[in-house]
Image (cartoon, helix red, strand yellow):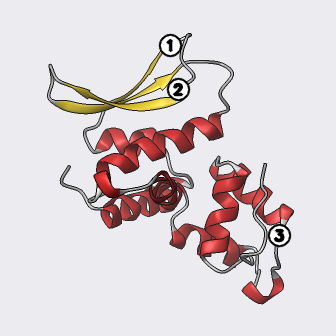
């Protein structure tokens, strides 16, 4: 794939500034990667990256299974997408891919703008801030783990506790 991680994050930030959110499926589709929903009732897979040999393209398949939460689906789609944009895919750990996916879902600039809009200073935040994490989760449709880890990475939360449910 001929797009860099920074390009993807730049596009996510641009979309957020234009529309107020990051439509992950639109972002991926605009890059020429089809994302589709399929009924896979006997599978526990939320989403998976598939190479379509007939069309010579990668696709992301989302399992249309009602038991999956929309925030989990967004995160898993982002992880599958991260596999494509990651330059060192074969050497990446699941943690690397999750961190990249989290950066796509919640880029630094978006988090910083969000925090600034709330008039919160880093020194006012501690180990865990339920209200801030809940705000991020509801505003950007991400799980608590994604929000907490991104806040931690940017220094808004202490590295001592991450138990986000």
Label for residue 128?
A: 3
Q: Which residue is mark 1?
A: 40
- Secondary structure at badge 3 equals loop
Q: Quadrant of residue 158?
A: bottom right
Q: Nearer the viewer, residue 44 or 4?
A: 44
Task: Identify the residue at horizontal 14%, vertical 29% (top origin).
Answer: 56
Cα distance between the residues tagged 3 and 2: 31 Å
Mark 2, Cα crowd under 10 Å, few <14 / some 14-19 / many 20+, is: some
Q: Any mark on residue 99, and which?
A: none
Q: Position of residue 55 (x, y in %)?
A: 15, 24
Residue 27 horizontal/vertical position (percent): 39, 46
Distance from Cα at disc 1 to Cα at disc 2: 8 Å
31, above or below 61, in the image: below
Comes first in the chain, label 1 or label 3:
1
Q: Is residue 9 left or right of residue 56?
A: right
Q: Position of residue 147 (x, y in %)?
A: 67, 59
- Asked if residue 109 is positioned above or below residue 24 in the image, the reply reads below
Whether pointer 1 and pointer 2 mark residues with C-beta atoms closer than 8 Å, the reply is yes
Instruction: Indicate which disc, 3 or 2, sits on the residue closer to the N terminus.
Output: 2
Determine the residue positioned at 77% across, 80% down: 120
Instruction: Name which of mark 1 and mark 2 comes first in the sequence.
Output: 1
**Residue 37 screen position, x and y as percent:** 46, 21
The answer to whether mark 1 and mark 3 are in CB contact below 8 A is: no
Residue tagged 2: 45
As rendered, which of 145 and 123 lies closer to the eye?
A: 145
Question: Disc 2 on helix, strand or loop?
Answer: loop
Residue 14 sits above or below residue 66 on the image = below
């Amino acid at each position: 794939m001929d797009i860099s991680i920074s390009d993807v994050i730049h596009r996510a930030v641009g979309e957020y500034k234009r529309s107020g959110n990051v439509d992950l499926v639109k972002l991926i589709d605009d890059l020429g990667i089809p994302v589709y929903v399929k009924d896979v009732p006997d599978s526990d897979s939320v989403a998976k990256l598939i190479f379509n040999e007939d069309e010579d393209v990668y696709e992301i398949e989302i399992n249309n299974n009602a038991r999956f939460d929309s925030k989990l689906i967004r995160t898993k789609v982002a992880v599958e997408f991260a596999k494509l944009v990651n330059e060192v895919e074969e050497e990446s750990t699941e943690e690397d891919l999750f961190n990249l996916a989290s950066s796509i879902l919640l880029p630094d600039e978006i988090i910083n703008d969000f925090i600034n809009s709330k008039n919160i200073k880093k020194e006012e935040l501690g180990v865990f801030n339920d209200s801030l994490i809940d705000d991020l989760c509801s505003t950007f449709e991400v799980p608590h783990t994604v929000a907490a880890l991104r806040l931690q990475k940017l220094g808004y939360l202490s590295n001592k506790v991450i138990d986000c449910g």
